Amino acid sequence: MDEQRPLVSVIIPNYNYARTLDLCLSALERQDYPHIEVIVVDDRSTDDSVEIAHRHGVRVLVTDTNIGAPAARNLGVEHARGEVLFFLDSDVALTPDTVGNAVALLTSDPTLGVVCGTYEPEPLIPDSRVERYRSLQLHYWISGDAGDITTIYSAIFAMWTRVFHEIGPLNPALRHSENADYGHRITQRYRIVLDTAIRGAHDHDDKLSVVLSKFFHRARLHIPLYLRRPDFNGGPTNSSRGWGSLAALFAVVTLALPVLFGPLWLLVPLVLLAGSIASDLGMYRFVWGYAGAAFTVYFTAIHFLVNVTVALAVFVGAAQCVLSSKFRNTYDMPEASAPAMGA
C-alpha cells in the first residue's frame, strides 16, 4: 500500500535562516508520511545554513547568485523526482501529519491544483511581543480563509508536479508578490484550497519596522492585481478589513479637527477608530480569549499602526497605477529564467 503512495518532493528555499533551518528539517524527519525527498535550495547564504542542511542528509542546491525565493523554488522543481511538490519556507516547522494530509487532499479531488496551509498561533522561536502579535494575527487571518481561496500561501503549499508544469514556474521577478500572481494563474484552471490540517509553526518577524515595511510593500504591490481582479483574496470587494484600514488612516487625519474646531470634534476620530476595530472584531475577540486583556490592548495598538500603513500603501499603489504603465502591468511581466546553479 505504501509503495503506491506518491513521492513528495519538499522544496525549501533558504537564505541565511540557519537559526530555523535545523528545526524545519527536524520536523520533516518526524513526518508520518513515508515517501519524502527533501531539497534545500540555498540562495547564497552567508551563515552556516548549507552545513546544517548537509548534517540532515538532504539534497542541497546552491545558487551562483542570490536569485530570490520564487526562482529558488523553480530551481528546486528542476531537480525534484516526486509526483507531488511541497513548497516550504525554511523558517517553518510542520506538524507531523502535515505532508500526509496534503497528499490525502490532493488525491481526493482532481479539481484541486494547490492545497495551502496555515500557521500555529505561537511562533516557532518567540523573541518579542511584536512577533507574538504577528503570529496571532496571521494565524487568525489565514485560518479564517479555510476553504476555496484565490491566492497561495507560499510558505506552506503543495501541488501535483504535472500541474506545476502545466501552469508554469513562479515569476522570479515578483519576489514580494509571487503568491498573488501564482494564485491568479492557477485559479484560471484549478481550485486552490486552504486546509487547517496543513500547518506549521513559523518564525515571524520580531521587529515592528520590518513588519510594517512588509505590510506596506505587499499591499502596494497587490494593487495592480486587485484592480484587475477585485474578487481576489484580500481585495476590496470581499473583505471589511480594507475599510478598517481606511478608517484607521482617517482617524489619524481627523485628529486635527478638535484642534481646529473644538473638543467636540474628537468624536470623529474616535468613531473612526471604533469602526476600524469593528471591521475585524472577531480577531480581537480571539486574541482576548487566547492571550488575555493586557496583550489585547498591545495587539490593538500595533494593529492600528498596521492598518494605517496598509491604507497608505493602497493610496501609493493607486497613484503608481495612474502614473506608471509599468507598475499597472506588473503581473504581465515575462518570467525570467533562474541563473545557473553552483556546485
Image (cartoon, grey):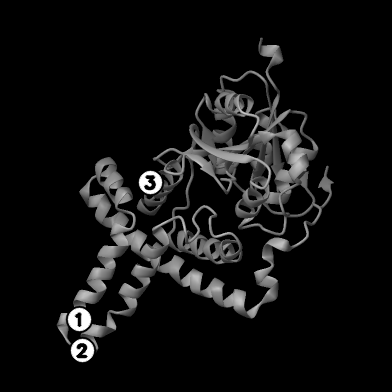
Is 184 displayed left or right of 286 in the figure? right
Mark 1 residue element: helix
104 shown above or below 176: above
> Could you classify mark 1 by the number of other residues whose Cα lies within 10 Å: few (under 14), some (14-19), or many (20 or more)?
some
Q: Residue at x 33, y 58 (%)?
A: 279
Mark 2 residue element: helix
Residue 87 image position (x, y, % from top left): 64, 39
State which tag comes first along the sequence, 3 or 1. 3
Q: Which residue is mark 1?
A: 265
Q: Amino acid at mark 2?
A: Phe
Q: Which residue is mark 3?
A: 136
Eye-nearest disc, 2 or 3: 2
48 shown above or below 175: above
Q: Amino acid at mark 3?
A: Leu
State which tag comes first along the sequence, 2 or 3. 3
Is 295 displayed left or right of 341 in the figure? left
